[in-house]
Image: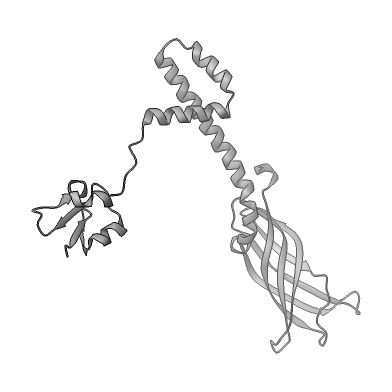
Amino acid sequence: MKSYFIHDGNQKTGPFTFDDLKQRGIEASTLIWFDGLDKWTEATNIQELKDVIIKSPPPLDKTSSLKQTLDKTKKILDSDIVDEIENKIPNKKGKRVFTWSIIILAIVGLFYIGNNLLKKGTISSAKGIAVDSIAIINPSGVVHEDWYDKDKMYIGISGKMMNKSSVYSYKDFVVEVKYLTETNTLVDTKQYTVFQSIKPLDKIDFNARLDGEAPKGSKYYSLDWKLISATPFIPEKDK
């Protein structure tokens, strides 16, 4: 059985059977060698490989591509107005300058629209990266009898918050709070929403009194808490 070898310009691979070449797919310019050939030969020059060569598309007609771009541009702009202005230009050079000006104008317009859509579109995914964008420094918390109402419990968390995002502000922070006894035994885990906000690249003192009931059984708990999620938004001045 004949064995074929392939060379990609850097290294040789093989041996391959004829069926292997069929499955791999080779281009007309692929260099092939097998016992019986004096030198590496392009596949297009080997008669037995004619049927396994992948047909490559023809080279791009730049003139046709330019026409397609202009036609798409006219669809974005008012086609009648573009044609009317173009017909009034007396020479080919002027028409060519006009054509490229219209295309560049359209590209700039599309880029501006796309950039705004991207900003609005990615806001939905920014909620998922809030935890990565926001750093919590020295988180701490405590539960004890309320100083003003002994029948209630004071539940408070604190720390510093840093927003590493240069685009998004965040608000409505969802935190997960773990209630720990004096012996560091986990008693309960709850989630709360803290209605504060932070601007891009800003740092704030994060202090919150949580509305909720502390677990029964103790007059004192320490709190271990972390950020779960937050709602992103673009500051008004950046919209």
Image vertical order of residue 87 relative to residue 129, above or below = above
Image vertical order of residue 235 relative to residue 136, above or below = above
Residue 27 location in percent, x, y?
A: 27, 49
The residue at the point 58 percent across, 19 percent down is 80
Image vertical order of residue 230 relative to residue 85, above or below = below
**Between 110 and 151, which is closer to the camera in this rendering?**
110
**Between 230 and 59, which is closer to the camera in this rendering?**
59
**Between 59 and 55, which is closer to the camera in this rendering?**
55
The residue at the point 45 percent across, 10 percent down is 90
The residue at the point 68 percent across, 47 percent down is 235
Image quadrant occupied by the N terminus = bottom left
Task: Indicate the colouring scheme.
Answer: one colour
Q: Count of labels shown?
A: 0
Q: Does residue 202 appear left or right of residue 74 in this picture? A: right
Image quadrant occupied by the C terminus = top right
Q: In the rendered image, which quarter is residue 161 located in?
A: bottom right
The residue at the point 40 percent across, 15 percent down is 92
Residue 207 location in percent, x, y?
A: 74, 66
**Between 7 and 126, which is closer to the camera in this rendering?**
7
Residue 81 location in percent, x, y?
A: 58, 18
Q: Does residue 167 appear left or right of residue 86 in this picture? A: right
Residue 83 location in percent, x, y?
A: 53, 18
